[in-house]
Amino acid sequence: MGIKRSTFYYQKKVNRTNIQQEISLKEKIQQIAYEYPYYGYRRITAQLHRENSKVNHKRVLRMMRELGIQARIKRKYVTTTNSKHNHRVYPNLIKNFLTTGINQVWCSDITYISIRFGFVYLAVMIDIYSRKIVGYAIGKTLSPQLAITALNMAIASRNTDQLIHHSDQGIQYTCKDYIKILKDHGIRISMSGKSKAIPTIMPLPNH
């Protein structure tokens, strides 16, 4: 074909300067992604420009893919308390209350746990003195049954004499079925004011 034999054995010379620049740029991208986990490739490119690194967003995207870097997705806040109801609201019985042992005050609350394809709700019952979870339930909805399941678990394993149950004013804790269980077991009912977090009650020293 009229091609010199040396052409077949030709190898492109490695530009070590370009390799070092590539490594340095990747390190900067990793650092920015660590400091700003919600930044995508365009915002990382903008940050690099602010740091006087001239690079286009396509190159940054390629490097992020090579490094396995992906921006985190900011999830919307999930409300777990619905206090817009006509159920009876009970007074706060534990304001300035000092616990001296277990099974004096249980606090109930509901939160949510992010999973791969969304989130699930977690209802928990905590003994304020020991800080131990005495009941819990996991579900896909905020139905009162979620809180009831956690309550029944706690009641089945603990002594409820002289017990105060404290919660927010959410509909799960004010519904008639939940209140009935508390009253049937002689448990006193306490609730926080609207838009107030459940207070932290510390045990006596040296316990």
Image (tube, rainbow, N blue to C red):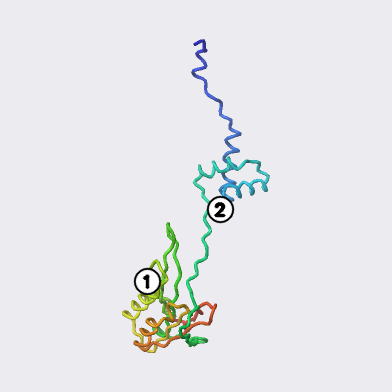
Q: Is residue 23 left or right of residue 157?
A: right
The tag on residue 95 is none
The vertical placement of 134 against 13, above or below, is below
Alpha-carbon neighbours of circle 1 within 10 Å: few (<14), some, or many (≥20)? Answer: some
The vertical placement of 114 against 57, above or below, is below
Position of residue 162 measured from the top left corner of the image (x, y, whole percent): 39, 89
The vertical placement of 55 against 104, above or below, is above
The structure residue drawn at horizontal position 50% and vertical position 70%, both measured from the top left corner, is: 79
Tally of numbered discs: 2
The residue at which mark 1 appears reads as: 137
Query: Which of labels 2 and 1 is toward the front?
Result: 1
Q: Quadrant of residue 15?
A: top right
The structure residue drawn at horizontal position 52% and vertical position 56%, both measured from the top left corner, is: 73
Q: Is residue 168 left or right of residue 31?
A: left
Position of residue 101 measured from the top left corner of the image (x, y, whole percent): 41, 84
Position of residue 86 measured from the top left corner of the image (x, y, whole percent): 47, 83
Position of residue 32 measured from the top left corner of the image (x, y, whole percent): 59, 51
The structure residue drawn at horizontal position 46% and vertical position 80%, both measured from the top left corner, is: 167
Q: Quadrant of residue 153?
A: bottom left
Q: Nearer the viewer, residue 143 or 158?
A: 143
Q: Earlier in the sequence, mark 2 or mark 1?
A: 2
Q: CA distance from mark 2 to mark 1?
A: 34 Å
Q: Amino acid at mark 1?
A: Ala
Residue reaching furthest top? 2
Q: Quadrant of residue 163?
A: bottom left
Q: Nearer the viewer, residue 8 or 62?
A: 62
Alpha-carbon neighbours of circle 2 within 10 Å: few (<14), some, or many (≥20)? Answer: few
Residue reaching furthest left? 156
The residue at which mark 2 appears reads as: 34
Q: Amino acid at mark 2?
A: Tyr
Q: Secondary structure at mark 2?
A: helix
Q: Secondary structure at mark 1?
A: strand
